[in-house]
Image (spheres, grey):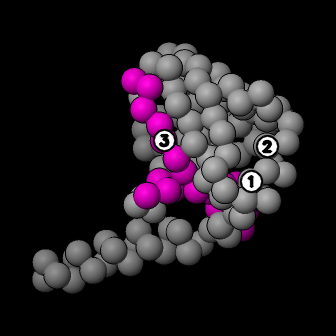
Amino acid sequence: MQRFALFSLFLLLAACREDAWMLSADEMQALLEQDRKIAFTRLAFSGTAVLRTDGTFEVTIPRLGEDTGTWRLDGDRICSRWAEFRKGQDLCALAGELPDGTYRSFLADSGTRLGDFWFID
């Protein structure tokens, strides 16, 4: 029974990534070639962020506050470094588009789902 539960959980997590059309480096570049504002959800957190073409961002998460940082594209990955929330650690993610036009992000190293986002500008 325990093996079945673990197998079912694995299938559920894997299906999340398969539902998304993973973006290529060119598609990521095209999405971020101008300043963009996004809204996002991750677990119990939601917020907004402004990504600027100069490689900086500002984020507001009502439950946590505000933060700033830098971002860069590394092939098909978007990498960010937050000033406060992540204590200066890099975070690299892959993004995929869902059938409804929103996007889902995944940790680049493990494929673990980070959350969903959409453009609001």
Residue 100 within the segment the image draws in magenta = yes
Q: Position of residue 104 (x, y in %)?
A: 59, 56
Q: Which mark is residue 91?
A: 3
Q: Secondary structure at mark 2?
A: loop
CB contact under 8 Å: marks 3 and 1: no
Residue 89 falls in which quadrant of the image? top left
Residue drawn at (56%, 36%) of the image: 80
Asked whether 27 or 117 is in front, the reply is 27
Q: Which amino acid, by three-letter code, is at mark 2?
A: Leu
Residue 103 in the image: above or below residue 56: below
Residue 62 seen from this side = no
Part of the protein shown in magenta: 87-109
Q: Position of residue 77 (x, y in %)?
A: 61, 53
Return the residue at label 1.
28
Q: CA distance from mark 3 to mark 1?
A: 16 Å
Q: Which amino acid, by three-letter code, is at mark 3?
A: Leu
Q: Secondary structure at mark 3?
A: strand
Q: Which mark is residue 32?
A: 2
Residue drawn at (21%, 83%) of the image: 4
Would you call the spot at circle 1 few (<14 residues within 10 Å), some (14-19), or many (20 or more)? many
Q: Position of residue 118 (x, y in %)?
A: 70, 46
